[in-house]
């Protein structure tokens, strides 16, 4: 159905089956039948597809009805949805040729809607809504891509950790906790970050991923079976000093703590049941 204009009136014989077409957003009604008696009469101009877009016009007849000549200039509207423009001079001030008769066109008090503004506001709101929908669609696409990337990374971590778990199970029967293979796997776990699976594997290996802590393995604690300084009253242990790759001792190294403890004379000759110094 095309955009057309309908005229209706209860006080005069207006054929409401006649449709007036729009051209460039404007509609021209050349002739409107008027009653033969003086007084007021009203007619309704409404859009055929949108009845709520309407305007009631009241005409006051004095003596004989004058000839009404409208300005031939019509406003050029680019929005096909705007059918009336209340602020247009062509609607507010039509040109009227008057001889000994007069006619006054006034707007009905019942017609309080500004149709042009309503249609314009609806058009602007529709455009804003489309812009927001496109913006939200862009955000959703970005988050879906990030979610897929994180999911792929999680699957890769789980696959790698499963392989490490299998390797740890294979070497769990080895007595020495300093197995080179085990140390390599522990280093890989530390590099993978603080995931729940990596923390669980790290705990099995006796390490912590949350800080720089040294783990003391009690099963490797054993009595000292090396030599000691027999000429020293405290019988200090002859432990080799740690060295850097260049052969020098680390800066600040002043000795081993075990040799800095002053032992009571009663404990200088304490031995274990196996004969080693504790």
Image: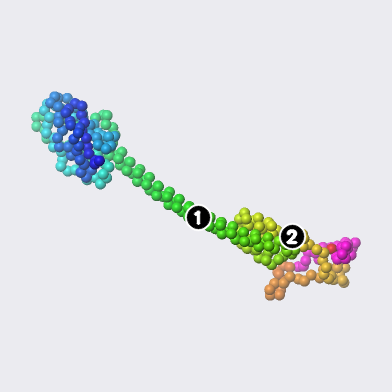
Disc nearest the viewer among 2 and 1 = 1
Q: Say above or below: 247 vs 217.
A: below
Tell me if mark 2 has few (under 14), some (14-19) or many (20+) residues whose alpha carbon lies within 10 angstroms of its own: few
Secondary structure beneath dot 2 equals loop
Q: Nearer the viewer, residue 167 or 208?
A: 167
Per the rendering, the mark at residue 216 is 2
Secondary structure beneath dot 1 equals helix
Relative image position of residue 267 (x, y in whole percent): 88, 62
Q: Which residue lies furthest to the right in this view?
A: 266
Relative image position of residue 133 (x, y in whole percent): 40, 47
Residue numbers of the magenta segment: 254-277
Residue behind mark 1: 148
Say whether residue 200 is left or right of residue 72: right
Tell me if mark 1 has few (under 14), some (14-19) or many (20+) residues whose alpha carbon lies within 10 angstroms of its own: few
Identify the image quadrant of residue 271.
Answer: bottom right
Magenta region includes residue 154: no
Say whether residue 49 is left or right of residue 28: right
Residue at 22%, 45% (x, y): give it: 24
Contact between labelled residues 1 and 2, with CB atoms less than 8 Å apart: no
Relative image position of residue 3 (x, y in whole percent): 24, 40
Of callouts 2 and 1, the N-terminal one: 1
Identify the image quadrant of residue 129.
Answer: top left
Relative image position of residue 126 (x, y in whole percent): 35, 44
Magenta region includes residue 274: yes
């Amino acid at each position: 159905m095309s955009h057309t204009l309908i005229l209706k009136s209860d006080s005069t014989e207006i054929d409401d089956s006649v449709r007036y077409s729009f051209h460039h957003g404007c509609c021209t009604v050349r002739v409107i039948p008027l009653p033969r008696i003086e007084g007021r009469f009203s007619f309704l101009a409404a859009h055929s597809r949108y009845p709520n877009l309407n305007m009631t016009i009241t005409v006051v007849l004095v003596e004989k009805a004058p000839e009404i000549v409208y300005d031939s200039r019509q406003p050029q509207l680019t929005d096909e949805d705007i059918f009336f423009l209340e602020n247009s001079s062509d609607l507010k001030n039509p040109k009227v040729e008057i001889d000994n008769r007069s006619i006054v066109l006034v707007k009905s008090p019942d017609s309080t809607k500004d149709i042009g503004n309503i249609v314009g506001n609806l058009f602007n709101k529709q455009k804003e809504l489309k812009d927001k929908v496109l913006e939200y669609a862009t955000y959703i696409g970005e988050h879906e891509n990030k979610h897929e990337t994180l999911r792929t990374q999680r699957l890769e971590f789980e696959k790698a950790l499963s392989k490490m778990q299998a390797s740890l199970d294979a070497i769990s029967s080895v007595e020495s906790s300093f197995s080179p293979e085990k140390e390599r796997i522990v280093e890989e776990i530390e590099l993978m970050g603080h995931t729940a699976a990596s923390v669980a594997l790290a705990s099995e290996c006796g390490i912590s991923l949350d800080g720089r802590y040294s783990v003391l393995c009690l099963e490797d604690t054993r009595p000292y079976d090396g030599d000691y300084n027999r000429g020293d009253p405290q019988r200090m242990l002859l432990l080799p000093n740690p060295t850097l790759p260049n052969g020098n001792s680390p800066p600040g190294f002043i000795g081993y703590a075990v040799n800095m403890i002053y032992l009571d004379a009663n404990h200088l000759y304490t031995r274990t049941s196996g004969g080693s110094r504790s």
